[in-house]
Every structure is written in structure tokens, then in C-alpha cells.
Image (cartoon, helix red, strand yellow):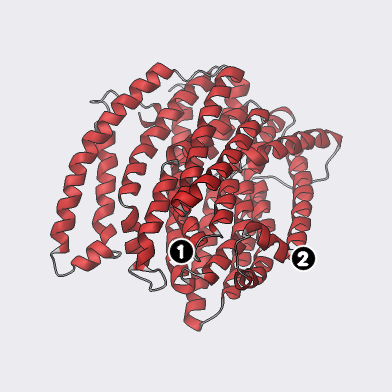
Amino acid sequence: MSEHVIAKKSILKKTIQVGSNTLVSRILGLAREILLMRFLGVGIIADAFTTAFMLPNSLRKIFAEGALTAAFVPTLVAVQKKEGKTQVDKLTTLSFVVFEVGLLLICALIMVKARWTVLLIAPGYSAEQVAATIPLLRIMMPFIFFISSSALLAGVLNIEHHFFVPAFGPVLLNGVFIGSILVCLKYGLGAQYLAWSILLGGALQCIMHIIAYIRLGFSFSLWNTTTMVYFMQVVGKFLLCFMSMSVMEINLFFDQRFASYLAAGSVKLINLANRFMGIPLGVFAVAFSTILLPYFARVKLDNPDRLAFYLFEGTKFVLWVTIPATFILAFLSDQIFLTLFASVSKNFPMDRVAEAGFVLVGFLLGLCFFSLNKILLSLFYSFHDTKYPTIISVIATLFNIAGNYFLVDIWGSFGLAVATSLSGLLQTILCFYFLQTQHNLSLKNSELLLFCRNYGTQVITVLIPLYGIYSFCFKTIAKTAYGTFFTQSFGFWVWALPLILLCYGALYLLKKQFELPVYFLE
């Protein structure tokens, strides 16, 4: 069996492993949001909790899924290959001390200046909303210390191709979150008790990473002058990666900032819609790019010509997964919020179902581009190139802010989501352009266009009869004694989810008939 086939199988196996853990985490996250809706509703307290959790949670995504990983992993790969495991221990120790002390100082500053921070994040909030947000923010800020510690250790685990613990961490966190909401509902506790539980979940996740780190034979040891050289490389990359790997979170920050001027609950709706768009993004794109990053770093050292092949095939794989997901989720957008929130909680008004559905559609317009950007940025970092991703991200962020400014008055919260999607499209275009001009990675445009044409034909061919089956099932089930439960509540997903799986099964089985070779599906 060839080395490339072994690599492909390893990539797929570990992507499935990480993706399945992420899927479990997202399902638990969905259950968490449903319970949170019953607990907080859509209003002042819900917006306060969402805003207070947004800052540490956004920093979590920046560190755990973004800048720190992108800067740390390629350097660790090079250090391990050149210096060995001992120097990896020293670099990890130094990075841990510097980054975590810095984060503790940031946490302390934000907790002291909590009112200023809330007004910066949500300038449109009333005095009542600000007062509700401040204590929650002060409780939850230290969460980022535990979670960033986990991210650092996860980088070391990744170079050993150990992805289970980092992928299982969010599952553990959501489990603690759900249990805490149930306790708060049962005993009538306030939102502050729930905030404390988030710290507990972060601490448990950190302990789990420390145990895995030690079991793999790593340790903490005093650094030397050689370590300082490598650490400065990490810091330099991190400062540049911070912008490029955080563009999604920065855009969401500005979306929620603009949404704070809209009706109460708009911040929560933006957050909810973004979470649903994040299910396919996290389960597939984040998992796939996480696995590919250390592989890209090794391929760049051993066989750089192979990167162009991975770019082309990775792009096809992303398109194969995300295009049907976009159509299906957009079609079911109203049903998502009706069946999972409005039908089970009086705290989610029926008149906001359509608004939430429109916001989700706005984000879904960019799902394909957000997913591609995860892969494209990993390619840049395999070249140790942080300059162009930073330039691209600054341009995309400024474009998003301008889009928010012009579209919020026209389409409200839907306009904010559309602006973010357009920003993702611009980022994708610029990434492809600079990969080709600066690193000679050609995308084989004619072959990709042929793939898109054939795949578009296949998707239409599969979705049209599937829509007929869906309509027949919906109308037939609606006439039964349990029609309301199976069309307007949780029961809807009992028969809708199998249809979605049927769609992907048909796409997979018929790909040869439509001349759709996809390396990662063979």
C-alpha cells in the first residue's frame, strides 16, 4: 500500500474521530441551547448571558481552534523533527508560562473594567442590560485561562496524532453545562450559578489535557536559549495568526455589536443562528483542517509538490459536503427554530421564528466559504506564511464592518448575517489568489469548474425528488393523530433526519455516474 494511500486513510480516520466527537458536542450544544431557552428565554437576561459568555468563548475559539494552534503546531513539528522531544517539553513549558500569565492579566483587567467592556461589546444596551451583564462577565472571564491551557497542550497532542482528548473536551464542557442548567431549573437558581458551572467545566477539561499530555511521555522542564529562539518564532506567528484565524469570531463580535441596537433578543438570535451554521462547519471543516494542519506541515518539509494536490482535492471534498448542507439547512431554517425552540418553550416567541430562520439563511450563504477558509489558512501556515493571511483577514473584516453598516438598516439582523457571508466569500477569493501568486499552488480552475458543473447537476437531480418525498411525508403525517408532534415539534426530526442521510447516501452512491472523482471519498 502506497504512502499516500496510508496518509489518506489516516486523515479520514482521524477526521471521522474528531468530527464524531464534535458532532456529539454540537448535539449536546443544541440540547444546551434548548434548555437555555427555557431557562433564560429571548430577552434582556438572555442577551446579558450571551454577551457575557461571548468574550471568553470567542477567546476560546481563537486559542483552541485558531491562532495559537496555527502558530504552535507547525513549529512543534519542526522542533520535534530537528531537536527531539526534550526541546518540545521546554518550548511547551515556556509558552504555557508566558501565554497563561498574559491571559490572567487580561482577565483581571476585563473584570476590573467590566462596565467599560460591556459597553464596548454592546454599545446599544440599556442601563438594565448593562447591569445584568457585568456580574456574569466577571464570573466567566477566567474560563479562558483553563481553556487556553487545554489548547496549548492539545497542540502537543496533535503532533503525536492524538486528537481524541482535544475533540472530547467540548463534549465534557457541554455535559457540565447541561447538567448545571437542569439543576438551575429544578431549584430555581439564577444565571450566576450557571456562570460558575462554566468555570468548573473549563477546569475539568484542562485536567483531562494535562493527564493525556503526561501519559504520552511529555513533561514540563526549564527552557534554554534554543527554546527562546523557537518561542519567538511562535510569538511572531501568533500575533499575525491572531487576526487571520480569528476573523469569524471578530465578525461575530461586530455582528452582535450592531445587533445590540436592534430589538431585545436580537443578540441571542444572531448567536443561535451562528451556532446552527457552525454545526456542519465544526463537525466537518474544523475537524478536517485540524487533522490536515500537521500533515501539511510534514508534507511541506518532505514533498512540497504534493500540497497542490491536497489543495485541489480538499477543495472538492469541502464543496461535496457543504453545498447540499447549505440547501437543506436553508430549506429547513424555519422548522429548526419552530420545532426545537418555539414549540417547547414559551420564552421563544412564535413571531420571531421567521426572523431567526432568515438570519440562519444569511449565515448559510457563507458556509462553503467559511469551510474552505479553514483549509486554505492551514496551507498558508504550512508555508510558515502569516503575512498574507493577516492582510486578507484585515480586508475581510473591514468589508464585514462596512457591510453591517449598510445592510443593518435595510434587512436588520438578516443583513448582518449576509455581510458576514460576503466577507467569507471575499476571504476565500483572496486566499486562492495569494496561494497561487505567492506559493505557486494552482487550483486547476478548469477541472474545478467541471467538477462544480457536474456536482451541481447531481445535487439538483437528487434534491428535486427528495423534496417530493419530503412534501408527501409532511402532508401525510400532518393528517395523522400525532401530526402536530411530528411536524411542529421534536418528532419532526424522527423522519426528517433519515431523509437528509438518504440525500448524502444518494450523492455518494451516484458520484461515478456524474463523473465526480473525490480523492477523500474513494
**Image check: 198 left or right of 96?**
left
Could you tell me which residue is drawn at 34 percent across and 47 percent down? 330
Could you tell me which residue is drawn at 65 percent across and 40 percent down? 243
Name the quadrant containing residue 322: top left
Amino acid at dot 1:
Glu
Asked if 358 appears above or below 486 in the picture, the reply is above
Q: Which residue is mark 1?
A: 33
Looking at the rendered image, the disc whose residue lies closer to the viewer, 2 or 1, is 2
- Specify the quadrant that holds the C terminus: top left
User: Which disc is residue 112 wearing?
Assistant: 2
User: Which disc is residue 117 wearing?
Assistant: none
The spot of residue 457 in percent (x, y) is 26, 29
The spot of residue 61 in percent (x, y) is 59, 49
Query: Mark 1: few, some, or many residues within 10 Å (few <14, many ≥20)?
Result: many
Query: Mark 2: few, some, or many residues within 10 Å (few <14, many ≥20)?
Result: few
Q: Does any portion of residue 434 appear in the rendered image?
A: yes
Amino acid at dot 2:
Val
- Specify the quadrant that holds the N terminus: top left
For the residue pair 512 and 489, the one nearer the viewer reads as 489
Name the quadrant containing residue 350: bottom left
**Image check: 427 left or right of 459?**
right
